[in-house]
C-alpha cells in the first residue's frame, strides 16, 4: 500500500499515504530538484484503512499548498514523495485534475440584496463549486487583523508572532479551508453580512486573482424584505436597520483596499438584466458568457419574498411612526450617501 495522489491543481496536490512505523509521515511536492511544497499526511479520513484493535488510522490524508503557482505543463511533471523511505506516491488512475485558469468569486452585500440570485447565476454559468453561505472568512480575517496590530500584545509575544509569521499562517489556513471544502481552487463564496464585508481585504491577500462583486439595495426595500423573510414577534427592527447601514458604510470604507471590485444594484438586476450581464462579463473577463448571464438573471428563479419589490419610499410602507423615526435616524444618512431618496 503506497497511497495515491488523488487531486492535482496548479496550486495544490492532495491524496493519502500509509503511516510509517505507526505514525503519520510527511510528503513533499517536487518539480525536478525544486521542492514547491510539503505537508504532513495526518488528515483523518473515514475512507482510509482503520485498525480497530489499535484505535488508530493506518493511513493519513495530505493537502500540499504550493509555495508558488505552477503552469499546467509543470503540473503534469510534478511528483509527490513520501518521506521516511516512502518513495514516490503514484497518481490515482482517474486522478482529479483541477480546472485552469482558476476562477474565484466572492459575492458580498447586505442580506436581502440580491446576493443569492447573483450567486446562483454565477455558479451556474461558470460551473463553479458553491456551498451556499460559507461564513468562514472572518474566522481567519479577525485573528489576522488582531495580530497585525503592534500594540495588541506585549513586546516578547509581539516579537515572537512577527518572527514566526503568524499573520501568514492565517492566509495559509484560509486557503487550505477554501480549497479543501470546495475540492477545487476555483469556487464561488456567496456570504452576505457585515463580517464578510470586513474580511474582504484579507481575502484579496489570500486569493490575489479573486473577483469581488458587491450587491446593494435601497434600505426601505431591504428592510421590508427582511421583515417578511425574518419576521417574528420579536423582530429587531432597530438591529436590522443598523445591519443594513453598517454593511454599506463598511463597504464604502474598505472597498478602496481591494485591487478591484464590481458594485451592482439589486434593482438593476431586475430591471436591466442585460446591462448587469454586460458589466459582469466585462469584469469577469468572460465576454462569451454575456448572453448566458443575461438569460439567468432574466429567467432564473429569484429568491423573493415579494415584500421589498416596488417599495423604495417610506410612503409605500405600512410602518408605524416609531419605525419610520427609527429608520430615518439610523439609515437616513446612509440612504443619502448612496443616492437613495426616502
Image (cartoon, helix red, strand yellow):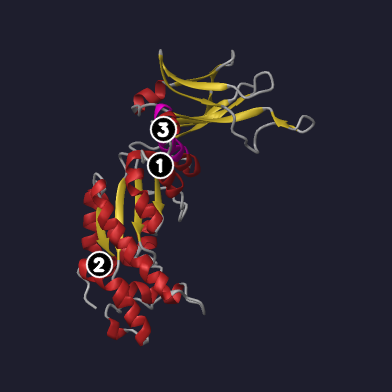
Q: Quadrant of residue 279?
A: bottom left
Front tag of 1 and 2: 1
Depth order, front residue of 208/283:
208
Front tag of 3 and 2: 3
Mark on residue 268?
2
Q: Residue 172 at what x, y percent from top left?
A: 43, 35
User: Which residue is pictured at 26% across the width and 60% down the height?
Assistant: 264
Total marks shown come to: 3
Depth order, front residue of 42/250:
250
**Residue 209 drawn above or below residue 308:** above
For the residues labelled 3 and 2, the Cα–Cα distance comes to: 52 Å
**Residue 119 drawn above or below residue 220:** above
Q: Residue 206 at what x, y percent from top left?
A: 36, 39
Q: Quadrant of residue 186?
A: top left
How crowded is the residue under tag 3: few (<14 C-alpha within 10 Å), some, or many (20+)? Answer: few
Report whether residue 53 is seen: yes
Q: Secondary structure at mark 1?
A: loop
Q: Are marks 1 and 2 in contact (CB under 8 Å)?
A: no
Q: Quadrant of residue 321?
A: bottom left
Q: Main secondary structure of the magenta part?
A: helix
Q: Residue 168 at what x, y percent from top left?
A: 40, 33
Q: Secondary structure at mark 3?
A: helix
Stretch in magenta? 162-176
How crowded is the residue under tag 1: few (<14 C-alpha within 10 Å), some, or many (20+)? Answer: few
Residue tagged 3: 155
Report whether residue 291 is seen: no
Mark on residue 92?
none
Mark on residue 152?
1
Amino acid at each position: 500500500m503506497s497511497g495515491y495522489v488523488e487531486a492535482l491543481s496548479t496550486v495544490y496536490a492532495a491524496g493519502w499515504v500509509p503511516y510509517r512505523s505507526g505514525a503519520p509521515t510527511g510528503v513533499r511536492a517536487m518539480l525536478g530538484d525544486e521542492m514547491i511544497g510539503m505537508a504532513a499526511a495526518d488528515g483523518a479520513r473515514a475512507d482510509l484503512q482503520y485498525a480497530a484493535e489499535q484505535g488508530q488510522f493506518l493511513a493519513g490524508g495530505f493537502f500540499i499548498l504550493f509555495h508558488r503557482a505552477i503552469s499546467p505543463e509543470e503540473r503534469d511533471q510534478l511528483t509527490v514523495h513520501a518521506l521516511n523511505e516512502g518513495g514516490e506516491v503514484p497518481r490515482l488512475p482517474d486522478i482529479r485534475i483541477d480546472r485552469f485558469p482558476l476562477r474565484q468569486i466572492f459575492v458580498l452585500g447586505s442580506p436581502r440584496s440580491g446576493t443569492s440570485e447573483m450567486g446562483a447565476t454565477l455558479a451556474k454559468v461558470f460551473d463553479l463549486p458553491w456551498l451556499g453561505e460559507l461564513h468562514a472568512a472572518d474566522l481567519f480575517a479577525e485573528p489576522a487583523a488582531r495580530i497585525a496590530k503592534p500594540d495588541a500584545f506585549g513586546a516578547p509575544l509581539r516579537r515572537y508572532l512577527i518572527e514566526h509569521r503568524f499573520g501568514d499562517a492565517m492566509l495559509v489556513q484560509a486557503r487550505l479551508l477554501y480549497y479543501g471544502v470546495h475540492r477545487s481552487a476555483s469556487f464561488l463564496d456567496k456570504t452576505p453580512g457585515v463580517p464578510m464585508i470586513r474580511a474582504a481585504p484579507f481575502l484579496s491577500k489570500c486569493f490575489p486573482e479573486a473577483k469581488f462583486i458587491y450587491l446593494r439595495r435601497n434600505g426601505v426595500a431591504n428592510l421590508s424584505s427582511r421583515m417578511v423573510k425574518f419576521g417574528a414577534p420579536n423582530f429587531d427592527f432597530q438591529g436590522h436597520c443598523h445591519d443594513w447601514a453598517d454593511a454599506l458604510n463598511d463597504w464604502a470604507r474598505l472597498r478602496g483596499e481591494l485591487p478591484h471590485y464590481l458594485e451592482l444594484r439589486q434593482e438593476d438586476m431586475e430591471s436591466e438584466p442585460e446591462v448587469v450581464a454586460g458589466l459582469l462579463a466585462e469584469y469577469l473577463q468572460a465576454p462569451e458568457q454575456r448572453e448566458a448571464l443575461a438569460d439567468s438573471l432574466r429567467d432564473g428563479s429569484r429568491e423573493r419574498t415579494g415584500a421589498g419589490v416596488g417599495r423604495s419610499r417610506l410612503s409605500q410602507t405600512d410602518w408605524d411612526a416609531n419605525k419610520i423615526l427609527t429608520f430615518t435616524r439610523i439609515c437616513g444618512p446612509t440612504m443619502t450617501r448612496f443616492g437613495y431618496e426616502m
